[in-house]
């Protein structure tokens, strides 16, 4: 069990620091909304989920042991509430997802026709180094990434949202989702590969 | 090779596989370009602009936080 870590932000909230609270609300909102939208598609319901998660968090501030970061903790609450909102569907999905993980490990993420019989690239990926940083982080490109993530299957989407968008660490994400580190990596890999592909299509 | 990229980036390969992976990447333009693209993809995913919290929601949550605080301090 990880020792409770000292987190200045959490301490500030426990002291009742309103500025710190508003700052955390603002910084986490985008990532929490995207996470909620992984489970419930309606933005209004997603917002309700995020709101309920904060209400739960405020009530539990004193009892929270601080074994994970504040962001991981609130993400976990969002996941629980969002899953409860669509319990019926998630029961149907959960069994299928077991098979998805097995199948995922075998299915290639890059079109096999891009490799020759010797396994070497037939058509090399064009390096993006010559794409100016300003276009990479421009509105269009980031919009493209956002839609590529939105189009992923939920199991892949939740992992990339937690890892690359919200930037939580691998162990925290495996624990949050209750999946093995290996399955976490398999899903992350498929998610990143699909988003990369979509960017490649966009840039070519 | 491309299927090992995330295991490599997550530092989940054995020392031996990691060395072999790096040796291959050093000599393969396609795989090194692909690896860089994966890194860029991760970096850009972290730059997606955040949807701002609606004022109404922020006010409501702040109100609850304040009442928690006042109960807490009495």
Image (tube, rainbow, N blue to C red):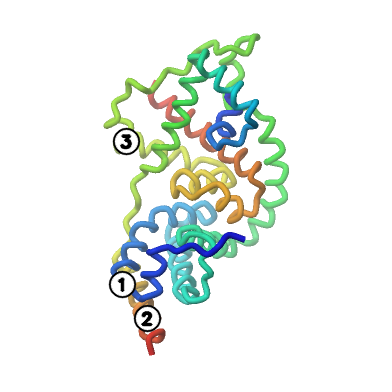
Residue A9, position as x, y percentages in the image: 38, 64
Q: Quadrant of the N terminus of chain A?
A: bottom right
Horizontal and vertical percent for residue A36? 49, 57
Whether marks 2 and 1 lie on the same chain: no
Name the residue beneath numbered marker 1.
A18
The correct choice, above or below, for A187 with respect to A43 in the image is: above
Does the CB distance between marks 2 and 1 fall below 8 Å?
Answer: yes
Q: Chain of mark 1?
A: A
Q: Say which mark, if any, is on residue B69.
A: 2
Label 3 belongs to which residue?
A137
Using the image, name the chain to which the residue with label 2 belongs: B
Q: Residues within 10 Å of mark 1 (few under 14, many from 20)?
A: some
Residue A37, position in %: x, y? 48, 54
Name the residue: 69% across, 54% down. Answer: A92
Within 10 Å of disc 3 (Cα), the crowding (few <14, some 14-19, many 20+) is some
Residue B64, numbered label: none
Point out the tag, 1 or 3, that comes first from the N-terminus. 1
Q: Is residue A42 left or right of residue A107?
A: left
Q: Is there one chain holding both mark 3 and mark 2?
A: no
């Amino acid at each position: 069990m990880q020792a409770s870590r000292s987190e200045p932000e959490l301490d500030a909230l426990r002291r009742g620091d309103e500025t710190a609270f508003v700052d955390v609300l603002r910084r986490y909102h985008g990532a929490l909304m995207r996470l909620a939208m992984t489970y419930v598609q309606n933005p209004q319901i997603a917002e309700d989920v995020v709101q309920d998660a904060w209400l739960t968090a405020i009530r539990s501030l004193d009892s929270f042991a601080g074994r994970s970061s504040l962001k991981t903790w609130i993400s976990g609450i969002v996941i629980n509430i969002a899953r409860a909102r669509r319990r019926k569907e998630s029961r149907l999905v959960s069994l299928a997802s077991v098979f998805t993980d097995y199948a995922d490990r075998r299915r290639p993420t890059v079109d096999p026709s891009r490799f020759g019989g010797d396994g070497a690239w037939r058509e090399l990926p064009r390096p993006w180094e010559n794409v100016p940083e300003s276009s990479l982080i421009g509105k269009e490109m980031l919009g493209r990434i956002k839609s590529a993530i939105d189009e992923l299957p939920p199991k892949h989407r939740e992992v990339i949202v937690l890892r690359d968008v919200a930037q939580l660490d691998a162990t925290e994400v495996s624990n949050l989702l209750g999946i093995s580190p290996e399955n976490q990596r398999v899903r992350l890999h498929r998610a990143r590969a699909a988003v990369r592909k979509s960017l490649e299509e966009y840039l070519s | 090779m491309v299927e090992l990229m995330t295991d490599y980036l997550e530092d989940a390969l054995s020392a031996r596989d990691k060395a072999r992976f790096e040796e291959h990447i050093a000599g393969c333009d396609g795989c090194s370009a692909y690896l860089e693209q994966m890194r860029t993809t991760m970096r850009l995913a972290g730059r997606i602009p955040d949807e701002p919290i609606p004022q109404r929601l922020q006010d409501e949550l702040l109100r609850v936080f304040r009442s928690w605080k006042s109960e807490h301090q009495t």
